[in-house]
């Protein structure tokens, strides 16, 4: 038999002193790891909210530019139809005019399409304000980390 060398003795001693991996206490990650992941999450949230805000502002601008032209078209159409109704020539046209008047009165009592557009523009503006607030909060949290 051969005698063990000094290196082999050290290895044998080390194996006896180190407990097996299953009996070791679980290692706790460094406290900086959660902050890094939180920073990453907040940064991605800020970028996604910024993109959403840009899209909302573009949609608001688009709706604001198209709304006046549509209002003019609707107004002109109503004026033309009012002129045509004033001059019914036959009994059939008179009956149609009366029927359209009652139908238009019912439509006027309901919300018009213009009001819905205005409401949707105001809703979009409110949503954009909310998104701006969320971005500000996320930036504050990021600065606090």
Image: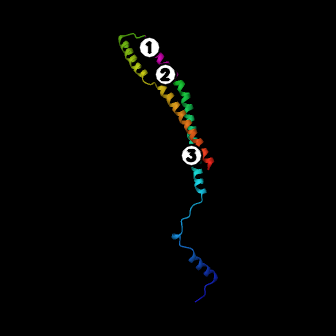
Instruction: Say if 128 sits above or below 21 in the image.
Output: above
Q: CA distance from mark 1 to mark 2?
A: 15 Å
Q: Tell me residue 47's x, y (percent).
A: 59, 44
Q: Tell me residue 143's x, y (percent).
A: 63, 47
The residue positioned 48% from the left and 16% from the top of the image is 79
Disc 2: CA contacts within 10 A as few (<14), some (14-19) or many (>=20) = some
For residue 125, which numbered disc appears in the image? Answer: none
Mark 3 = which residue? 45
Disc 3: CA contacts within 10 A as few (<14), some (14-19) or many (>=20) = some
Is the stretch drawn in magenta largely helix, strand or loop?
helix
Mark 1 = which residue? 84
Q: Earlier in the sequence, mark 1 or mark 2?
A: 2
Camera-side mark, 3 or 1? 3
Q: Earlier in the sequence, mark 3 or mark 2?
A: 3
Mark 2 = which residue? 74
Q: Earlier in the sequence, mark 3 or mark 1?
A: 3
Mark 3 vs 1: CB contact within 8 A: no
Mark 3 vs 2: CB contact within 8 A: no
Instruction: Say if 11 sits above or below 54 in the image.
Output: below
Camera-side mark, 1 or 2? 2
Range covered by the magenta-colored residues: 71-86
Quarter occupied by residue 91: top left
């Amino acid at each position: 038999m051969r005698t063990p060398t000094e290196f082999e003795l050290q290895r044998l001693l080390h194996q006896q002193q180190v407990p097996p991996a299953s009996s070791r206490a679980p290692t706790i990650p460094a406290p900086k790891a959660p902050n890094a992941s939180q920073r990453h999450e907040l940064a991605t949230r800020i970028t996604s909210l910024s993109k959403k805000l840009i899209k909302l502002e573009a949609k608001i601008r688009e709706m604001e530019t198209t709304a006046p032209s549509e209002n003019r078209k609707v107004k002109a159409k109503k004026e033309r139809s009012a002129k045509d109704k004033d001059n019914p020539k036959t009994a059939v046209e008179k009956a149609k005019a009366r029927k359209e008047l009652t139908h238009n009165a019912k439509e006027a009592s309901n919300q018009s399409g213009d009001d819905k557009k205005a409401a949707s523009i105001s809703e979009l503006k409110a949503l954009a304000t909310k998104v701006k607030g969320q971005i500000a909060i996320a930036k504050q949290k990021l600065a606090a980390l």
